[in-house]
Image (cartoon, helix red, strand yellow):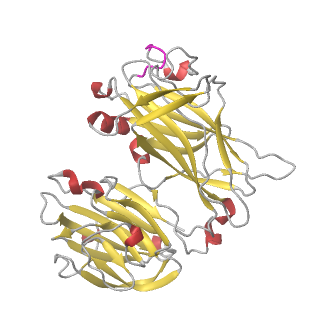
Amino acid sequence: MNRKKLGMMVLSLSMTVVFTFGGATMALFTGSAQNSNTATAGTINLDAKRDHGDYTPGPMFYPDSLDPVGNHPYDTSKTNPSGESLGGWAPGDTVQRTMILTNNGSLDAKLKGVKATVRDSYTQNLPTNPASSRTVTGLTSGAAYDEFIQKANVKVMVPDTNTLLYNGSLSSLLVSGYAPLQNEPVLTGTRPPFAPGPLNVTFEVKLDQSASNEIQGKSFIFDFSFYSEQARNNGPANNNSVYRPATQIPFSFTDISQDGGTYIPNSNQDDTAFEINSPFAINFYGQSFDKLYVSTNGLITFNGPNSAFGNTPMAQAPDNSIAVFWDDLIRGSIYYKGYTVNANAADPYLAIQWSGYEHYPSSPSTVIFQTKLYKSGKIEMLYNDMTFGGPAGANNGSSATVGVRKDANTFQQYSYNQNVITSNSAIQFAY
């Protein structure tokens, strides 16, 4: 993907968190930062570290399995309210730790999004002589895992300015893209002879009071990553021509089949694409389109009709295409409606909705999803009900592609055959 004009990078903090229940447990936050890109006119070089005086670099929180006799740097007022053993967790308990971020590059960096990634093990290397290590393992699926990611709330703050960055369930961070930050702090670059100022970021994780015994004695491991951009490349400097990675947005759904939407005749036919004339020109990757083609398989194309039922990664998708939920769908209805007046006049949008589609060859239940194509180029994808029922092989995007593409060098893929497109969720692609 072409990123040279954006000055983008992903700050991969590798803040690994391990949670275990029914014994002394807590979490691991490591303190390294990786920069995946540099900007044309300079560099972004972010670094992360802890500041709790830990005697061993690496984890912020320690389960006993990693550190049975060491000094555990817990804040007991946050981690031990239930009177359990040090590091133990019970429903209602909260843990909080701080990371310190520094930008040693020449360009200012703005934090834009955060996400979590599950892993099945974590190994801590110790600075001993001879060298040694400790390893802990965790669950990545199952009933206990599903309950934990729903019942664990993550709150990310900049405490020095009382600025909230994110507050929501852990499950909302386990996405292919990045959940947007409610506020976007800037880490200034170096300005010789001055050193860059640090940014303190706290992570607070709270286990809901309603958590059951299902998670007792279980371990779960997650990495947290931030997405960042060169600060002065936000907005107009991007020239409205390259989409950033998708971010999650609040879910709000209007069923346009009940709101004056136009039904596309024969959209219940299999593997068919239909031409739609937009009431305004749509900016897509810096090009203007007033005509588009909508497929019964959840794919939108601009260059011509494409009714392919076999989804591919966005790297192989058609040029100038939007994969809203590209899968092998059958027997549904497509509606569309332009929202161009009143509150939408400044940035009108064309809404397109797929209703009542089964998965080929048949499925007990149907899905309903929608996209909003804004005149400015912003794209929202709204997923109302994404469960086909029956075998789980197609549910929640497990056999679908979601993303946008200009050409082989310029595209954004949110997911490909991944179980991450859940009901009552929404994402956004924006410049």
Q: Residue 297, percent across and down?
A: 25, 72
Q: Looking at the rendering, in which quadrant would you find the C terminus? A: bottom right
Q: Is residue 261 visible?
A: no
Q: Which residues are magenta?
A: 83-89
Q: Residue 113, percent across and down?
A: 53, 52
Decide if residue 73 is on the left or right side of residue 80: right
Residue 85 sits inside the magenta stretch:
yes
Q: Residue 355, percent across and down?
A: 23, 67
Question: Would you place residue 268 above or below residue 251 in this image?
Answer: below
Q: How many marks?
A: 0
Question: Would you place residue 38 above or below residue 343 in this image?
Answer: above
**Residue plotted at (23% across, 57% down):** 394
Please state which of residues 129 and 185 is positioned toward the viewer in this rendering. 129
**Residue plotted at (53% across, 47% down):** 225
**Residue plotted at (73% across, 58% down):** 107
Q: Is residue 149 visible?
A: yes
User: Image quadrant of residue 217?
Assistant: top left
User: Image quadrant of residue 368?
Assistant: bottom left
Q: Residue furthest right?
A: 193
Q: Residue 41, percent across and down?
A: 73, 66
User: Image quadrant of residue 388?
Assistant: bottom left
Residue 398 sits inside the magenta stretch:
no
Decide if residue 393 is on the left or right side of residue 182: left
Please state which of residues 152 and 124 is positioned toward the viewer in this rendering. 124
| Secondary structure mostly taken by the magenta-highlighted segment of the chain | loop
Q: Residue furthest front?
A: 130
Please state which of residues 135 and 196 is positioned toward the viewer in this rendering. 135
